[in-house]
Image: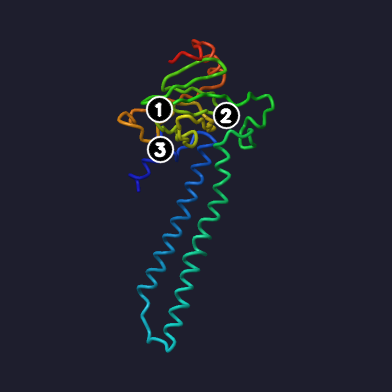
Amino acid sequence: MLVGLVGCDGPQSVLDPAGPSALAIATVWWWMLGVGTLVLLGVVALWWVAMRRRAGPPPDDQPQVADRTGRHWIVGGGIVLPALAIVPLLIFGSPAGLHQLPLPVMSWSRSAADPTAPPPLRIDATGQQWWWALHYPDSGVRLRNELRLPVGRPVHVHVGSLDVIHSFWVPRLGGKLDAIPGRTGIVRLQADQAGTFRGQCAEFCGLGHAHMVMTVIAMPPADFDTWLADQPRTTAHQRP
């Protein structure tokens, strides 16, 4: 158990969230773990009871009893039990997906309580073998394998690809999104604390896949504005 708990921390752990989107995912994961553990214990308990139960003399209507018992197991174990385990998780987990979508800022965000807060920041992330091109379209800043964002402000990352399917993922800040050639997807990130996080391509994309790593730096808003203003601008046709 101690060895396993080591994996719950670190720069790429989904169980160490640093923003509301990642927190929603981690909460669903813990609930799924808890429900899955209860179901496992229940199945083991039923197995233990069945193994210890002594068979009595067969009843006169044994075929009918066997049919009724089979139907009970099919209904109880094949319909009722999965419904009791899966439906609550579906109802509970579906709203967590709203945290990942570029919807209007909701009540879970601190930005929603401040009408003067800036709108979500847009960043374009383009995957290619084997690196990430990051572009801030409002300012013209372009980076390579480095994404900077202000703390407390939602960020809408527009994800695409130039060659094969990649997958954009910053585990401590939000969910993953496939980067598909010819298409653009959008995922919402938000950091609630300053720090450095690790992003990784989560889709095998060739020989250099393991090295397709991105550094994500969350900065206090004032520091981010200063950094952004000091960066050189590029035209739309230039690459970093």
How dense is the environment of label 3, judged by Cα within 10 Å: few (below 14), some, or many (20 and up)?
Answer: few
Horizontal and vertical percent position of residue 112: 65, 32
Kindly identify which numbered label has been placed on residue 9. 3
- Disc number lying in front (2 or 1): 1
In this view, the residue in front, 190 or 139, is 139
Q: Earlier in the sequence, mark 2 or mark 3?
A: 3
Q: Residue at x 41, y 68 (%)?
A: 46
Residue that lies at the very extreme toward the right in this rendered image? 115
Labels 2, 3: front one? 2
Q: Is residue 213 left or right of residue 141?
A: left
Can you tell which mark lies on residue 154? 2
Q: Are marks 2 and 3 in contact (CB under 8 Å)?
A: no
Amino acid type of the residue tagged 1 in the rendering: Asp
Disc 2 to disc 3, how far (Cα)?
24 Å
The quadrant of the picture occupied by the C terminus is: top left
Q: Disc 3 vs disc 1: which is toward the camera? A: 1
Q: Is residue 212 above or below residue 8?
A: above
**Residue at the far bottom in the pictured view:** 60
Q: Residue at x 47, y 66 (%)?
A: 77
Alpha-carbon span between mark 3 and mark 1: 33 Å
Dot 2 amino acid type? Pro
Label 1 environment density (alpha carbons within 10 Å; few <14, some 14–19, many ≥20): some
> Residue 131 sits in which quadrant?
top left
The image position of residue 72, as x and y in percent, is 48, 73
Q: Residues within 10 Å of mark 2 (few under 14, many from 20)?
A: many
The residue that mark 1 highlights is 163
Residue kind at label 3, given as amino acid type: Asp
Q: What is the number of the mark on residue 33?
A: none
Q: Secondary structure at mark 3?
A: loop
Q: Earlier in the sequence, mark 3 or mark 1?
A: 3
- Residue 199 spot, x, y in % from top left: 42, 30
**Rendered view: 25 above or below 227:** below
